[in-house]
Image (tube, rainbow, N blue to C red):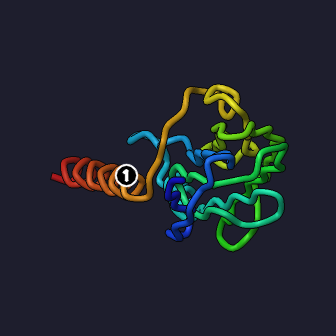
Amino acid sequence: MSDVQDGFGRTSTAVDQSGLLALVLSADVPRLREEMAQAATLAATVPEATVDGVVVARGWGTWTVPVAPGTHSVMFRCHVYGNVRRVAQAQVRVEPAGREQVYYRVRRDGTAGARAGRLPGSAGSVGIARMVVGLTMLSMMLGLLVLMLALVAAIL
């Protein structure tokens, strides 16, 4: 048996015969030259993962969810400014005592829907950027700082 923490900080004990489903929720990281509107949209985006109709994780990051062996329906959706957008689904088979990963990727500009897949490359157009909320805020603050410094330098 092993202790597993779900996306809401609850700890449960996984029996040896149960499988684990790792959910990786990520997004393209805005570049410093990109418009700040894209960064604001990404900051307002809250992803949510459901397994077999039950919400198991909310927020960016990697979540490990204990599941029974068999095929599971995994659905991802994002809440952007209160609206549900970017819905993606995947069917995942988990073997007894096995571990499967499902990747979910959202583009930063909001022009295209999200994708879900079993491999990092299948979930997005360019690689996989694992984004944790803290890193997201840090990169946006750094971008804002660079933008402000550029404006001050242009004024002086």
Q: Position of residue 71 (x, y in %)?
A: 84, 43
Q: Is residue 146 left or right of residue 53?
A: left
Q: Is residue 120 left or right of residue 85?
A: left
- In this figure, which residue is indicated by the disc labeled 1? 135
Tell me the quarter of the picture where residue 76 sits: bottom right
Label 1 sits on a secondary structure element that is: helix
The residue depicted at 66 percent of the width and 37 percent of the height is 98
Tell me the quarter of the picture where residue 93 sits: top right
Decide which of 65, 13 is in the foreground and name it. 13
Please tell me how crowded label 1 is: few (under 14), some (14-19), or many (20+) other residues with Cα within 10 Å.
few
Instruction: Tell me the kind of residue under disc 1.
Output: Leu
Decide which of 114, 68 is in the foreground and name it. 68
The residue depicted at 56 percent of the width and 45 percent of the height is 27
Q: Is residue 58 left or right of residue 88?
A: left
Relative to residue 19, is residue 8 depicted above or below? below
Looking at this view, name the residue that lies furthest to the left.
156
The residue depicted at 75 percent of the width and 52 percent of the height is 68
Relative to residue 3, is residue 10 depicted above or below? below
